[in-house]
Image (spheres, rainbow, N blue to C red):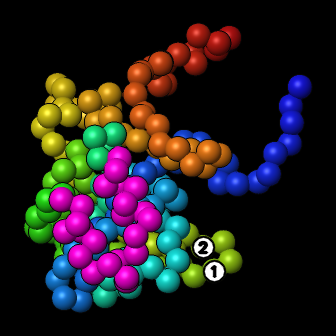
Amino acid sequence: MRKSIKTTEAIFPMPVLMVSTYNNDGSIDVMNAAWGTMVERDIVALNLTETHQTVANIKKRKGFTVAVADAKHVTEADYFGVVSGKNTPDKFANSGLKAEKSQLVDAPVITDFPVVLECEFIEYQDSEYGLGVIGKVVNVTVDESVMKDGKVDVDAVNAIAFDPYTHGYYKVSGRVGEAFSDGLKLKK
């Protein structure tokens, strides 16, 4: 039997993405964003409102980075979601994480996170159902420790996902099947 429940951000898992920019004074701003996805192979969409300092920075600097948060840094990732850069100017410094300037966009690469997408700002969509920030991925850097045979080893990344039902974080790991293959068993 099925039961109806209260509507929430009910698609699970939701990614835990760290969106990074530079503030006007050159300091680093990072926010935790769960509402983000790839809409094409090299286009990222982030559902962020213009009230965020991060969005103002993206519009001004025309660049940003998106890091995949991992279990090792769940505390820092959550901190970036519960503390506003508008009220805490030294937010990134308080995290203890390290960053370096991207060579391709005007944004920081947080080197502690295993996978980082460097993005050029394309546009901000502002409609009733708009997605907010749209960016073109111009580079992806990956820590060598999460690589296996020249590819990202998802289990080694230890990415985390957000659970909108109970507000928990979960590790994304444990391969359960083979894409574009397992389903063929049912093909007649």
Location of residue 25 in the rendering, given as x and y in whole percent from the top left corner = 19, 88
Disc 1 crowd, CA 10 A, few/some/many (<14, 14-19, 20+): few
> Foreground: 66 or 18?
18
Is residue 25 depicted above or below 167 in this figure? below
Q: Residue 184, labelled with which disc?
A: none
**Residue 7, how many percent across, how many down?**
76, 54
Q: Residue at x 64, y 14 (%)?
A: 187
Dot 2, crowdedness within 10 Å: few (<14), some or many (≥20)?
A: some
On the image, which quarter does residue 24 sit in? bottom left
Q: How many marks?
A: 2
- Going 12% across and 68% down the picture, which residue do you hit? 101
Q: Is residue 174 visible?
A: yes
**Residue in the picture at 19% in, 79% down:** 27
**19, 124: nearer the viewer:** 19
Q: Predominant secondary structure in magenta? A: helix
Q: Which residues are magenta?
A: 74-96
Quarter-of-image position of residue 160:
top left
Disc 2 designates what residue? Answer: 130
In this view, 83 is above or below 2: below
Q: Is residue 122 left or right of residue 157?
A: right
Residue 85 on the magenta segment? yes
Secondary structure beneath dot 1 equals loop
Nearer to me, 86 or 138: 86
1 and 2 marks in contact (CB < 8 Å)? yes
Front residue of this view, candidates 87 and 105? 87
Is the residue 1 above or below the residue 87 in the image?
A: above
Residue 75 sits inside the magenta stretch? yes
Image point (46%, 37%), residue name: 170
* Residue 127, numbered circle: 1
In this rendering, the answer to whether 15 lies above or below 19 is: above
Distance between the alpha carbons at the discs numbered 1 and 2 = 5 Å
Q: Quadrant of the C terminus?
A: top right
